[in-house]
Image: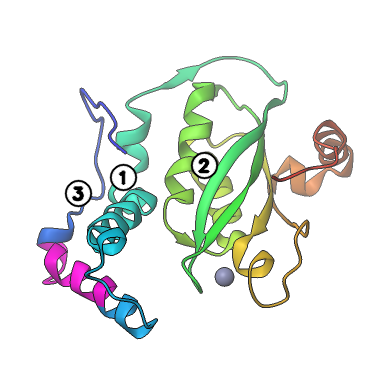
Amino acid sequence: MTLSITEPIQTKLPPLTTECETPVTEEDMKQAVRTLLLGLGEDPDREGLKDTPKRVVKALKFLTAGYHQSLDELLNGAVFHENTNEMVLVRDIDLFSSCEHHILPILGRAHVAYIPNGKVIGLSKIARICEMYGRRLQVQERLTVQIADAIQGLLQPQGVAVVVEATHMCMVMRGVQKPGSWTSTSAVRGVFESDAKTRQEFMSLIRHNPTFH
Ligand SMILES: [Zn+2]
């Protein structure tokens, strides 16, 4: 994905590009997909598959575009001073990621809450943060922790709580083949960790029966 960035405040990590970071060219990647197709017993030259290596490489680059983003770029200064002690909760953020073990989709939702300590962030940026970490090869546990730590680091709030509920295609379509199974992971920091009542309030606000289609 492309973000329109006018003035990045501070870019800790320079944007990576496949070209400068790795000697692997796009052509190499396409060849690798072609080899996979051959290994599957397919004819990569038949009409329907002719452009598949190109499409697969493009799709994979899109799904892992989060490697080339940094929090600074993504925020673009959208941190504001605000004196509030009330919980900010963004729930049901659609999350698309790819499992690092099988490169198959992880589909789910994130619920992110924090209690400010003088600083707040644009609400849409919370979804952007989830998206940035989602667009990498992931395990759900790490994805959850990365979102929590990002908010913690950016705002130093009184507390952060993140719950991710997701279904893993590597479980649904292969292996144990359990459609409808979903995994819930959480990461809590600050008052959400130390105060059971605050944590409880968050948990009751996000309680529902998730359905994934
Ligand atoms: Zn997997």
Mark 1 burial class by Cα count in 10 Å: few <14, some 14-19, many 20+? many
Mark 3 burial class by Cα count in 10 Å: few <14, some 14-19, many 20+? few
The amino acid type, in three-letter code, at marker 2 is Cys
Residue at 21% from the left image edge and 70% from the top image edge: 45
Secondary element under disc 3, as helix, strand or loop, is loop
Residue at 51% from the left image edge and 64% from the top image edge: 104
**Label 1 beta carbon within 8 A of ligand 1:** no
Q: Which mark is residue 130?
A: 2
Q: Position of residue 60 (x, y in %)?
A: 34, 57
Secondary structure mostly seen in the magenta stretch: helix
The residue pinned by badge 1 equals 69
Whether residue 113 is situated above or below residue 55 in the rendered picture = above
Q: Which residues are magenta?
A: 20-34
- Location of the C terminus (image quadrant): top right
The amino acid type, in three-letter code, at marker 3 is Pro
The answer, for residue 143, to whether it is visible in the render is yes
Within the magenta stretch, is there residue 184? no
The residue pinned by badge 3 equals 14
Q: Sequence-wise, which precedes: disc 3 or disc 1?
A: 3
**Label 3 beta carbon within 8 A of ligand 1:** no
Q: Position of residue 63 (x, y in %)?
A: 39, 51
Whether residue 76 is situated above or below residue 189 in the rendered picture = above
